[in-house]
Image (cartoon, grey):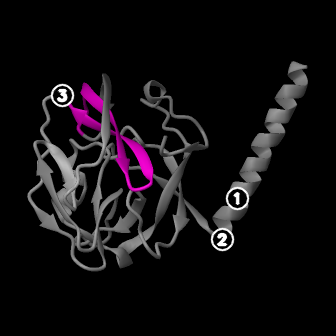
Amino acid sequence: MWKAVGKGALWLGALLLVVVGVLRLFFLDVVEVGHDGMAPTMIAGESVLMWRGVDEAEMGDILVCHHPTATGQMVLGRVVGKAGMTLRDVRGQLEIAGTVPDRDVLEEERFFDQTTNREDSYRRSLVKLGNTDHYIYERHGFTFRLRETRVDPNRVYLMGDNRSASQLDSRAFGAVPVSNCLGTLFMRFRPATTRSTELDHGWFGFLDP
């Protein structure tokens, strides 16, 4: 019995690799995450699948884009603001167009941020944004701050799920032209070889819960 199950799993794995190979040829790219600004959703060293092209970005989408000001650099983040929307902080929470997204504050957990090379306690929360639910991290002692910003036409405001990493998203470099964006991340292809066990990241896992 177990031999048959193992053989079936191998066939399924091989089939998935073939499907990914065909899709990659025409529609997909594999992107390697370079920092922990999107933790806990993604962490540095993970390989993630990206649908090529961005016709119209939706709230909650995770985009990969050319940096708006630094030639040759790439940025990634979740769309939290679209053209005409005003963003600001209200008592330490993100307000979007006059509304603070619903959130459930969960537990604190230890996380090693490879970008800053330090381990701290982070509060995990589940946030409702558009049609998606996603987790965010906020480092212990961190207070969210965002000066009032109105998103210009044909731009999107990108924010990392690791809200403590303000230097890695639009809080540092501003809203990004949609024309700069290359695609939408949707699935983890390969977890990182370190620091991923604690987050239970596995192969072929969708990025949002």
Q: Give the range drawn in magenta.
A: 116-139
Report the side of 2 relative to 54 (left or right): right
From the image, tell me which residue sits under label 2.
26
Report the side of 181 relative to 12 (left or right): left
Extreme residue toward the top, this view = 1
Task: Decide whether residue 133 is among the magenta residues.
Answer: yes
Report the side of 135 relative to 145 (left or right): right
Q: Position of residue 100 (x, y in %)?
A: 23, 49
From the image, tell me which residue sits under label 3.
140
Q: Is mark 1 on a helix, strand or loop?
A: helix
- Against 86, residue 49 (above or below) is above
What's the mark number on residue 150?
A: none
Mark toward the viewer: 1 or 3: 3
* Residue type beneath disc 2: Phe
User: Relative to the observer, which residue lies in front, 46 or 178?
Assistant: 178
Give me the C-alpha separation between circle 2 and circle 1: 9 Å
Q: Where is residue 168 in the image (x, y as percent from the top left)?
A: 24, 53
User: Relative to the observer, which residue lies in front, 131 or 61?
Assistant: 131
| Residue drawn at the location 23% of the way across and 38% of the way down | 116
Q: Where is residue 167 in the image (x, y as percent from the top left)?
A: 19, 52
| Residue drawn at the location 24% of the way across and 70% of the way down | 70
Q: Is mark 3 on a helix, strand or loop?
A: loop
- Against 46, residue 26 (above or below) is below
Q: Position of residue 177 (x, y in %)?
A: 30, 75
What's the mark number on residue 21?
A: 1
* Residue type beneath disc 3: His
Task: Decide whether residue 160 is among the magenta residues.
Answer: no
